[in-house]
Amino acid sequence: AQVFGWLQEEDILNHTMVIVTADHGENVGDHQLMSHKYCLYETLVHVPLIIRYPQGTPAPGPVTHQVQTLDLLPTILALFGDPSSELVDSLQGHDLLSSTRHEFAIAEQARPDLSTFYGRFPGVDVSRYDRALKMIRTERHKFVWASDGKHELYDILLDPDETHNIVNQHPETAQDLHQRLSVWRRRSQPATASTKAPEFDDETKARLRALGYLE
C-alpha cells in the first residue's frame, strides 16, 4: 500500500511496471526442515509472482503454466526496451506476454558447507544433507537428482505436498526426466573456474549473515 500510494502521489503509477516476487520460499517444519536450504521441494521453489503492467498494456491475467524468475528480465526488456536485442536472445527466459512456454522448470542447489553443523553439534549426523541437488519439473512430475544417488520423483498433481517418492515405482518417467535434465545442463554454460567471488565489506557481510547466507 505504501509503494502504490507513493506511485500515485508522484502520478507515475499508470506508467510503472510493478513486480512482486521472491527469490525462494521457506521451510517451517515442512519435510522436517527449517530455513531455505537442503532441498528443492515446492516449499522453496514455488514463489509468488504478481505483475502489474502499465496502463494500456494487454496483461494476460492469471496464468497456470510454469514460469520462472529468469523470465522477468526478458519481460521487462520487451516492454521497455528492444525485444529483438542480442541480450534478450542470449537469455533462457521468455517474455511473459509472448506465446512461448517452458516445457519444464529447473532449479539447482550446490553442495552445502556443513562445517558449522559439525562444529556446533559434533554428535549429530547431518551427512544426509551433504549433497548437491538438481531439479526438473514438468506440469505434472518433478524429478530431483541427488549427488548421493538418492533421487526423487513426485507426481505434483496427485501429491502436491511431495510426501510420496515414486522414483522406484515409475523408473521410466524418472529416466526420461533425468535425460532431459542432462541435455539442459549440457546446453547451459556454467561460470568458468576463473570467475572471481565478489568482495563484501563488513556491513554487507553482517547483513548476509543475519539473513542466513553466510555462516
Image: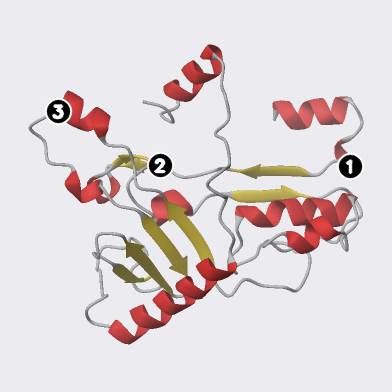
> Is 127 above or below relative to 99?
above
- Amino acid type, mark 1: Asn
Q: Which residue is mark 2?
A: 26
Q: Are marks 2 and 1 in contact (CB under 8 Å)?
A: no
Q: Residue furthest top?
A: 202
Q: Position of residue 72 (x, y in %)?
A: 70, 52
How far apart in space, not on screen, are marks 1 and 3 (Cα)? 54 Å
Q: In terms of image quadrants, where is residue 134? A: bottom left
Tell me if 210 is positioned left or right of 92 in this view.
Answer: left
SS for dot 3? loop
SS at mark 1? helix
* Amino acid on which disc 2 is placed: Glu
- Residue drawn at x 35%, y 47% is 111
Mark 2 and mark 3 lie on one chain; the one further toward the N terminus is: 2
Check disc 1 and report the residue beneath it: 14
Please name the residue shown 89% across and 26% down the image: 10
Identify which residue, 168 or 196, lies in the foreground.
196
Residue 33 in the figure: left or right of residue 23: left
| Residue with the mark numbered 3 | 121
Q: Does 196 appear above or below 130?
A: above
Residue at 58% x, 41% y is 195
Q: What amino acid is labelled 3 in the image?
A: Phe
The span from disc 2 to disc 3 (Cα, nearest Å) is 23 Å
Residue 143 location, x and y as percent? 38, 69
Between disc 2 and disc 1, the foreground one is 2
User: Residue at the spot x=45%, y=44% of the render?
Assistant: 25
Q: In front: mark 2 or mark 3? A: 3
Taking 62 as reference, is 207 above or below it? above
Q: Name above or below for residue 122 compared with residue 45.
A: above
